[in-house]
Amino acid sequence: MRLWAIAHRKLTCFLLGAAAVAALPPFNFFPILFISFSGLMLFLGQAQKLREAFSSGYWFGFGFFSFGLSWIGNALLIDVQTLGWLYPIAFLASGAFFGLFSAAAAMISFAFKDFTAKYLSLAAGWTLLEWIRSFILTGFPWNLIGTTLSFDLKLLQGASIFGTYGLSLCVLLSASAPALWLKEKNKKNLISTACLMIFPLLILYIFGMVRLHNSQISPSDYKIRIVQPSIPQNMKWNSSSLENNFQEYLNLSAQNGTQDLDLIVWGETASPFPLEFSDKHRQMIADILSEETLLAAGSLRFKIQDGRRRPQNSMLLINNKGDIVASYDKSHLVPFGEYIPFRRYLPASLRPVTNVIADFIAGDGPKTINIPSFPSFGVAICYEIIFPHKIIAPNNRPQLLLNLTNDGWYGDSAGPRQHLIATQMRAIEEGISIIRAANSGISAFINHQGKILGRLELNQKGNLDITLPQKLEEQTLYSRFGNLIPLALIIIILLVATLKNSGITLISKK
């Protein structure tokens, strides 16, 4: 009987976590969070031992992360004969590893005996573990709970103050609140629960309305073209298609002329040829550019290290003479995508995997590019855009950010759409406009308040001409202080939980 109760608890927690994925973009079924996190909270309230709390949190996280990150496995289907067998392993591994973070949050909650203190500490602990997840083992801060508010731009504006982690804290305090009433059903608890459910979201909504009010900005004289050729990933590096793929970029770039353009932007590794060494292909680019037009192209380049030629994932800025006038090298590499951790120690059975993943060299970190007669800009390549407060050069703030990416690996799935939301979050957090160029979508121009002012949809072939607004950026509170703000909120919540757990009230009842 006890074994059945344990299995039932684990399965229920797994299903609650899996159900919570429906609140993430692009599904945005936000109300499910009230069921999922309140259910988890009730199980944590029943836990008599630390291992029970750990188990409940772990299986909740297993369901949440295995289903929430299931789109990652689509990359393995590009070469299904070689790597397709890894798909179920990738699915299970996501839940197995990232479930440890939700288990740690559950353990923090277990440390408190009072149920209200458990509720507060779960919200704070989960948010703290989201932040830790952003840097441990190079970091992967995907599926942050704060992004579940992406169904309404007004609700996201609070990220300009305390970042996406702060939004996560607000959502968790709201979504877990029904457990307080379910634990002790009375009128007093019903009123306080309703307030906790509504108040954090209401404050965010009102702040968002005020921030977005009268946000019309006059256009500037700078004109940009984003190019999206929508080349299937299985054709992108096909040796017989390389020249045609490159020509497709050129044709879309030159469409309707370039004489009025200041900048043309291609996606990540858009050029199948290393432009640093290919005079021929740089000249082909130069031939379509007018005198004042520049082109930012994703391209591999190579560096000699330890006697070997190793690649870098780069952006090269090219003028109408075919010269490279500026460059940026991706600094935050994708584990198991651009490099294999501990590659030399892996067993022979995984050699096929290591052979198809390059051993890239990381760049030196965020930088600002200054060129005459154009706003200063930074660059984030693909995966780099998901890291809060790590995309801007701290001592040389740019006016604009280019995000070069290629989401063709993940097909028509949640991945590319969630990647776009992550880009919106960075725009709001940093108060900076972002030009996003993707090989197969979603390409977009996002202003400093997170508004998408133009976009090319997933798998849509074409180009997008935009005129930059006069106001490209504003210094937000979060851009000044970064994660100190959400971490301070987490500490405050944990202190309140500690006081509540000790029976100390902050407001006198006299």
Image (cartoon, grey):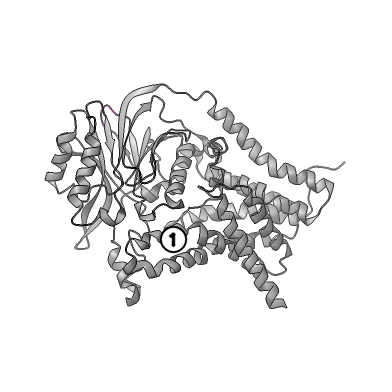
Residue 81 in magenta stretch: no
* Depth order, front residue of 444/168: 444
Q: Position of residue 10 (x, y in %)?
A: 63, 68
Q: Which amino acid is tagged 1?
A: Leu
Residue 373 painted magenta: yes
Q: Is residue 378 left or right of residue 104?
A: left
Q: Residue at x 75, y 46 (%)?
A: 193
Q: Is residue 397 left or right of residue 232?
A: right
Residue at 70% x, 52% y: name it. 497
Q: Which residue is mark 1?
A: 137
Mark 1 closeness class: few <14, some 14–19, many ≥20 residues within 10 Å: few
In terms of image quadrants, where is residue 370? top left
Pinpoint residue 155: horizontal percent, then vertical percent: 57, 38
Q: Is residue 145 above or below residue 137?
A: above
Q: Is residue 150 above or below residue 320?
A: below
Residue 336 seen by the camera: no
Q: Does residue 137 appear to the left or right of 487 in the view shown?
A: left
State the extent of the magenta-drawn residues as a range: 371-375
User: Where the N terminus falls, by quadrant?
Assistant: bottom right
